[in-house]
Amino acid sequence: MGHARETGQPLAVPDASRIAANLRGLFDDHRLSPSQRRIARYLLEHAQEAVFFTSADIAERVGVSQPSVTRFAAALGFRGFPEFRDALRSSVFGGVQPAPPAEDLNEIQELVNSEIRDLERLRDNLRDLSQLREVAGQLARSRPLLVMGLRISAPLAHLFGHLAEKVLPDVRVLDIAGSIAEDRLSRAAESGAEWVLAIGLPRYPRELEQGLTWARRVGLKIALITDQPVGRLTELADEVLLAPVSSDFAFDSHAGPTVLCTALLHTMLDTLATEGQTRLESFDDSATERQIFLPY
């Protein structure tokens, strides 16, 4: 579907890095739904052509509904799609603001810097996505999908489960150890579950090792998110995904494992393709209709 450029002065060829910086400035500081983040990602990757698209064009290319594109523009604070497209064109063909000067860092900023270095390590380790894609595909096909995390790992397990259930029909989070966990693992295996995603972060609960031992006993395969490549938990796992845990703060920071979980969910959604996107669209439409979220 072709679209002619509007009349006027010829546009200079924009610099890709400048475009990305401008668009990230446009999208930053806004809470976007998963569908809206897909739209933002498409615009980042196809900015120079997207500035001439209608909302229907963008919806077709991203695989969302036209109202979703309109809601995306509203979420960024624009009165409508035409106003958003004007801002998009300005971001692509306009100037860029200079970066603020660097300042001396205080103690907490230095600790944040150490976290950034850990995230850079995680980024570099994800250069080869073959394992992440393989694990994502296996987890996405497990019906039900089990997510297990005890003690300090329980909140991350619940976060993963909360997001995964938007695109999967049956997600079960296990945060209780002992015989109750064994019962739930057994029932899930009997219902057709094939995989359990376990999150094992320091300090590693003995009960998690016992639970994963039982999971193997009932025929479940284990994908483990942890910070160490060797240990008693990794010996039980079929797949191990590593993310650094920062110990520079008074309490461990789980930024790395959280990013890895988000990357895994992102890849699972790509694996699910139309099925996952349809479920996300359905949730967004239902949330809008029921006014679940505040408009800011």
Image (spheres, helix red, strand yellow):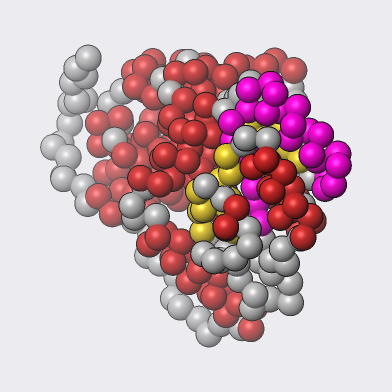
Which residue is at the far front? 217
Q: Residue 283, position in %: x, y? A: 63, 21
* Residue 42 visible in image: yes
Name which residue lies at 44% across and 65% down. 120
* Residue 33 visible in image: no
Left or right? Give the position of 220 relative to 238.
right
Identify the image quadrant of residue 193: top right
Reply yes or no: does residue 272 show up in magenta: no
Q: Residue 184, position in %: x, y? A: 78, 33
> Nearest the camera: 171 or 258?
171
Above-or-below relation of 60 to 166? above
Quadrant for the C terminus in the image: top right
Which residue is at the far right? 179
Q: Residue 200, position in %: x, y? A: 66, 56
Number of numbered tags placed on the structure image: 0
- Magenta segment boundaries in residue numbering: 176-200
Quadrant for the N terminus in the image: top left
Name which residue lies at 51% across and 43% down. 264
